[in-house]
Image (cartoon, helix red, strand yellow):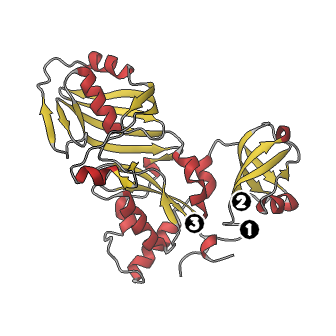
Amino acid sequence: MSRESTRSGILVVDKGRGATSFDVVAITRRRLGVRRIGHAGTLDPDATGVLPILVGEATKITAYLVDQDKEYLATVRFGVTTDTHDVSGRILSETPVDDLSPSRLEEACRAFVGLIKQVPPMYSAVHHQGRRLYELARAGIEVERTPREVVVRSIVIEKFDGPRANLRVVCGKGTYVRVLASDLGAALGYGGAVESLVRCRVGPFDLRDAVSWGELTGGRSDAPEGRSDAIGVGRELWSKVRPVEAALVGWPVVRLDGPGATTFAHGQAADVIPAAAATEGFVRVHDIDGPMIGVGELTAGGSKVKPVRILHADRSRTRSLPA
């Protein structure tokens, strides 16, 4: 097993304003000294907040983390529309906001809770014929986009101040809060755009527990690899990397003994002894000593578990830290 394969987990970062999600991945890769790194859910450059960075074997459970609910705090300015649906974009229209009340806004929000349809914005990372939509938008090209179904769990008005409102939004994957603000503004007859956006939570990962932007960059994102200051930052960050299973809190757990764990790791269904309480569905699979060894699916009434994702990291050994 390679040294890199023993270094895995999830680093929860509070992304700084102006940085792309790819920037965060690149900085983290350099700081931790690990090649295989990804993120769970793109954040716009102007947005801040929770961006889970998956390291090493943790990248194998990206889809399960992305699939979990997210929570945002958005400041929406009504009375303006832009081409990006936020205030950094080109202004398309401005309308006086003279009769908007908290009760009217609350009523309008109700129509956007539940299963709704959104048209992905042109300024987004959605692919169209091999190119990102934002690449086409920057070239002055607009293409037709198919509406997508998304789920909005709740919208709570936390503050109302004339043409502005702070909205706390809990939603499922694929939801664009910028589009939600624009559509909400259109429903009110004023238009609307996001003035600021903070992602407060992704699944179980909360902003309060995230590594700050300053901690990630060590105060200087361009520190050369190999420098003592960069190494120090890397060691400190490794101490804050959470185990892979932290992304799947609340999932049922199946523990396998030595032979069962070996069978599972070889890609074959393993016996669950005693049978799991659940009879079907996805579970976290751990070996008897505790570490997570994969994601499995229960079969045969909960008496067997077949591999869906197999993890080889952190098997009965201590995580290796950069020298």
> How far from the left and from the top, in percent, is residue 9?
57, 61
Q: 310 left or right of 232?
A: right
Task: Quickly name the residue at label 3.
Answer: 56
What residue lies at 67% left-to-right and 66% top-to-bottom? 314
Q: Earlier in the sequence, mark 1 or mark 3?
A: 3
Determine if residue 10 is in view.
Answer: yes
Number of residues whose C-alpha sits closer than 10 Å to that of mark 1, classed few (under 14), some (14–19) or many (20 or more): few
Q: Are marks 1 and 2 in contact (CB under 8 Å)?
A: yes
**Residue type marked 2:** Pro
What residue lies at 88% left-to-right and 48% top-to-bottom? 273
**Residue type marked 1:** Ser
Task: Quickly name the residue at label 2.
Answer: 291
Q: CA distance from mark 2 to mark 3?
A: 15 Å
> How far from the left and from the top, in percent, is residue 62?
55, 53
Residue 153 lies, with reference to residue 323, above or below; the image says: above
> How far from the left and from the top, in percent, is residue 53?
48, 58
Question: Of the numbered discs in the image, which one, if any, rests on residue 193?
Answer: none
Q: Earlier in the sequence, mark 2 or mark 3?
A: 3
